[in-house]
Amino acid sequence: MPSTSLHTEILKLREQLNHHSYRYYVLDDPEITDAEYDRLFRKLQALEEKNPELITPDSPTQRVGAAPLEEFETVTHTLPMVSLDNAFDDGEVRDFDQRLRKLLELDEIEYTVEPKLDGTAVELVYENGFFTVGSTRGDGYTGENITQNLRTIKSIPLRLRNDKTPIPARLEVRGEVFYPVAAFRKLNEQRLKAGEPAFINPRNSASGSLRQLDPKLTAERPLDMFVYGLGQVVGYEFKSQWEALQTFKQWGFKVNPLPKLCRGVEEVLQHYRHIGQLRPSLPYEIDGSVIKVNSFEQQRAAGMRTRSPRWAVAYKYEAQQESTQILDIQAQVGRTGTITPVAIMQPIKVGGVTVSRATLHNEDEIERLGVKIGDWVIIQRAGDVIPEVVKVIEAKRNGKEKKFRFPKKCPVCGEPVVRLEGEVAHRCQNIDCPAQLKEGIRHFASKLAMNIDGLGEKLIEQMVDKELVKSYADLYFLKQAKLIALERMAEKSAQNIIAAIDKSRTVTLDRFIYALGIRHVGEHMSRVLAKEFGSLENLQKAEAERLQQIHEVGPQVAESVSSFFKEKKNLATIQKLLKGGVQIRELAKPKAAEQKFAGQIFVFTGTLEKFTRDEAERMVDERGGRASGSVSKKTNYVVAGPGAGSKLDKARELGVAVISEEEFLQMVK
Ligand code: IVH
């Protein structure tokens, strides 16, 4: 039984952490350093690990950690999430005001003017101050239950603050989850690096990130949220939108700082313009301002249309769009071999910046737009993101436009271009393509691959630029004298690097496979393949069909692996690696007994007392099984700890075997 003082300490740590994370994520005004925060966090984590019975869902340690889902459940909104009518000029806003004044029989109306955030709308439900359910807007009536993903967003309170304002029994708030523009740019750079298609805009990446079945993936994205509206509230009376916004802040929500209370339509238009001026420098995207009648009583009196309220309107800002002509379309090779078609345009000023290139993303996008060389097009800039082509102006065609053919050969190295099963991107698969060589070597030398100590980015850059290495196999033929000739390279460091390269010559098969940098073959998949095939020769010979027979290997991986080993250049590089003295230690194939959960699906539910969720998942994984977050007919075992609820009911309903933690441990042994 844990002591009371321990319990008090845990509660105190949580309170401190909540306070500091509120200062950091909501107020953007931290009081302590990240390192201090991490120390407190780890302290709490350690105490909770030793005393798992004291873990509560609102603990700051519990934001991430839920198991992946198989699908989202649906949630019915208590009150529908309606949309807004748009206004496109001052006249339409004045008409809106006039209609309302007539309807409400008032000389002047008070409005709030708020930025219209360009993200994805969600609803959060708090019961007695605890965050219980979060959902997407969906069709306005029902949305998807994305609670566990929303929990990973640090500016969303798991528990409301009640130091200034009492908390209602039930509170439904609405707001916009968004992807900060700077982080969006970084994300796209990373995606292209990993050979994944870029997101079109921050809005898409916000909704894409929120709809991940595995909350760990959502947690990796720096999503943020502003709260701006209400659903159903039980046990609290709000009189106005302005009051609601202030109260949201007191409860610990992040509220946008730009809304203003305006008297009459002229003040409204003034603030609309003010927000418009700030727009280009905001760290998030907005596409208009929302004008709302402030008084809730007046809102009720004005009422609703079928799909939108009479008391609000969205006044859009001019899109950052222009028209220009496409002079050429070029294929550009990225650092990981992804080939992106780029439109070269007659230079044009959009939103104050002259642009001459726009991304066409990929072949599907070119098809969708129907774009040809010589076409007049509408292009769009969003923040500082690379401009994109929105649509073709077909009326301006003269018949001389030319269709763009995707190159069959890489424009940089001349090797064949492939489009892998299930991917939108074309890629150059040649691991020695100069366009990808630097990135390839960085990966090859990284810790989990060949682990060549000291081979940093700067050095790789020089080695490639000076043509010391034209393929990563060349590393194993490097001479110290050549290295010393490089900038800022002392004899001792050159010696160390040669020694590190030498040390990397003996490598296990899984690391070697990983080092090759085959698309879709990460660290885990490399291990799966190494275990299955036991040797490089066996793996090289495997056709896609054979590969697909392996549990965990889907069509994408199978295609990617088999096409990688068909590329002659890749085979030559592998030969050269072996010639350079690389020795691959083969992995012993595990005995059947060690894979005793092969093909079986486990679900863990309730409070686990004998092991953590991560440990449980690892035990299953190591034995060839799979841990899932939801119970279905395919589930083999539900492992239930104390307090198990709906998943346990579902297991009983479906007749799935339910076992205790103790029984699970017996099976593991
Ligand atoms: S209020 C009845 N306020 O715009 C009022 N919406 O077209 C309903 N949005 O689905 C919404 N910023 O995703 C409101 N400050 C703001 C908003 C906002 C963005 C989005 C929201 C909604 C859509 C309505």
Image (cartoon, rainbow, N blue to C red):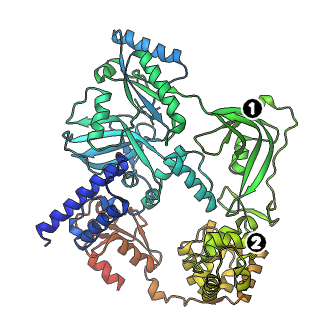
Q: Depth-wise, is mark 2 or mark 1 nearer the camera?
A: 2
Q: Which residue is mark 2?
A: 466
Tell me, yes or no, if residue 565 can be seen here.
yes
Placement of 139 over or under 619, stated as above or below: above
Q: Nearer the viewer, residue 526 or 627?
A: 526
- Residue 101, position in %: x, y? 38, 11
Q: Residue at x 55, y 79 (%)?
A: 527
- Residue 276, position in %: x, y? 51, 29
Tell me, yes or no, whether the two marked residues, 2 and 1, touch with CB atoms within 8 Å: no
Q: Quadrant of the C terminus?
A: bottom left
Q: Secondary structure at mark 1?
A: loop
- Residue 586, position in %: x, y? 59, 89
Residue 72 is left or right of residue 415, and the answer is: left
Query: Which mark, residue 461?
Result: none
Residue 390 location, quadrant: top right
Query: Which mark, residue 393?
Result: 1
* Inter-mark Cα distance, 2 to 1: 47 Å
Which quadrant contains ligand 1?
Answer: top left
Count the labels in the image. 2
Which three-letter amino acid code belongs to the residue tagged 2? Lys
Q: Residues within 10 Å of mark 2 (few under 14, many from 20)?
A: few
| Label 2 vs 1, first from the N-terminus | 1
Tell me, yes or no, if residue 430 can be seen here.
no
Residue 570 is left or right of residue 146, and the answer is: right
Looking at the image, which residue sits at the far right? Answer: 400
Placement of 30 over or under 620, stated as above or below: above
Q: Secondary structure at mark 2?
A: loop
- Residue 139, position in %: x, y? 46, 38
Q: Residues within 10 Å of mark 1 (few under 14, many from 20)?
A: some
Which three-letter amino acid code belongs to the residue tagged 1? Ile
